[in-house]
Image: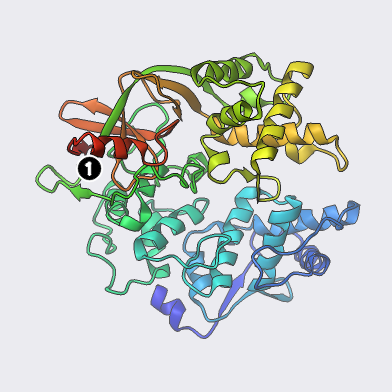
Amino acid sequence: MADIYRNGTGNLICLDEGIDDPAAIVAALNFVHAANGCATSDWGGADTSKSHGAMADLHYKHSNDLYSAGCFSRSWVVQEVVLSKQSTMVLGNSLLPLKKVLCVARSCYYYDRRLDDANLFIVRMLASILDKGDKVAHPKSADTVSSPAAAMYHLLFAMMYQELSDPRDRIYSILGLINWPEGIPSLLVPDYGKSARDVHRDAARYQLRDPGLRLATLQQVYHYSAPAISEVDMPSWVPCWIRSRMDLRPSGSHLFDHAAHSDTAVDVRSMETKGPDVLEVSGVSVDFVAQVGEIFERTDFAEQSSVGEVLNLFHKVRRLLPADLATNAGMFELANVLLQGWPNVKAWNLEDWAHWTKEETVENISAYITYLVEHKHQPPMLESLAIGEDAAVRKASRFLKQLVWVWADNQLFQTASGRIGIGRGIMNPADALVVLYGGQVPFVLRPSGVYHQYICDAYCHGIMNGEAISQHQAEGRASQVFRLR
């Protein structure tokens, strides 16, 4: 199919199905496009803050109706759009250039946020591909993906909301979007005689062999209640791309900017003699989990929820550090742990995609704690704040937004030697904390006879920048091999 679209002169995409008022949607697109001053080559779009009022809201509603159309949700439509030399959308009696449609969506996403995230995730992904003039690119970056494995990784994330009738097409539908200098690897050649389970397992095996990915594929694995996903019985180290993508952990993890691997290279091997479900990875054993705490859900951070557990978490982290909250250094250290090291790496302000300075980090956590103590409930969500809201409230809400991102379905843990960290809610005492060669973060593995089951990635304070590897090497200890199954 990829060759058909690639060799065609153009592509017409009919959008009428499921759309009740095509004329209203065309008018809405023209309104938003004009209001935003869209530049189709600019990832960021334009400032739409002046586009308010009842009429503007109605136009944005109609725009959202467009992006809810079935066309945007189908997996294979991405090839139609991306590979064709020219794509035009047909809506009623109007012809809409694809870039105009995507430009409007992109601008709305980054500024007004009045469109549904699930729908806009799809068009944002398509816009990034079209804008960069390559098969796939890193979001908000001019650098194209460096290898087929990396392109595959990014596409699997970018197409997380796409619908498909056959779970094998989660992998097969993106192969035509990737540049394969030496052809599609035999491990990935489409074969509908293979089970969906094996197709996804082989895709994970292929990605994990790529040193440039830094074992990021493992960080896409999300277990809810057991290391093996029961309904498809995946090996514990395979991301369950078969599962509804709405249930998956957001990729592009906030842990990706760490360097727990120091200068080590990825060392991953398939154990063909043991079967393709077994994966050998090299690294060092750091510690064992001794205690785990409360698992935090998103509802624990709801505006009117009790703040007792949250404050207890803060106090426990402070005692274990310890951190002197009477000093800026102590407050920054507390924030650094609670946000999984973001302030020391790149603490994103999720409101405007800017970085927090050290001073801003201290101001935001201080405002958050003060708000909890004074009001006995969570501050308002950042998106709900009115223009001109009190600065202290805005700072508290900023910290809350990052806190929710880090702690949803996470828990505090302490290791046998006294280290503290944050890991997924599935962690148990006696799980092993290891640093795998080439891995950006520590990983939690569960011993199971001669094998280990993969549990999750983790933040562990004090070993996020190669300290565990350096200590291991200084003591002259040999690396270890972990067999994942």
Residue drawn at x 86%, y 37% is: 389
Callout count: 1
Residue drawn at x 48%, y 83% is: 8
Residue 478 point in image, percent of width and height? 17, 38
Above or below residue 322? Residue 440 is: below
Residue 159 visible here: no
Above or below residue 369? Residue 23 is: below
Residue 334 visible here: yes
Left or right: 330 in relation to 435? right
Q: Which residue occupies the foreground of this view, 247 or 195?
A: 247
Residue drawn at x 28%, y 52% is: 265
Q: Give the quadrant of the N terminus.
A: bottom left
Residue drawn at x 61%, y 30% is: 329
Q: Secondary structure at mark 1?
A: strand
- Please give the residue where the numbered disc 1 appears in the rendered image: 282
Q: Tag 1: Cα neighbours inside 10 Å, few (<14), some, or many (≥20)? A: many
Among the 4 quarters of the image, the one containing residue 67: bottom right
Among the 4 quarters of the image, the one containing residue 106: bottom right
Q: Which residue occupies the foreground of this view, 135 or 331?
A: 331
Above or below residue 60? Residue 399 is: above
Residue 320 point in image, percent of width and height? 49, 18
Q: Give the quadrant of the C terminus.
A: top left
Q: Which residue occupies the foreground of this view, 416 or 444?
A: 416
Residue 434 point in image, percent of width and height? 30, 33
Most distant residue in the bottom direction: 9
Residue 63 point in image, percent of width and height? 74, 59
- Identified by mark 1, the residue type is Ser
Above or below residue 73? Residue 447 is: above
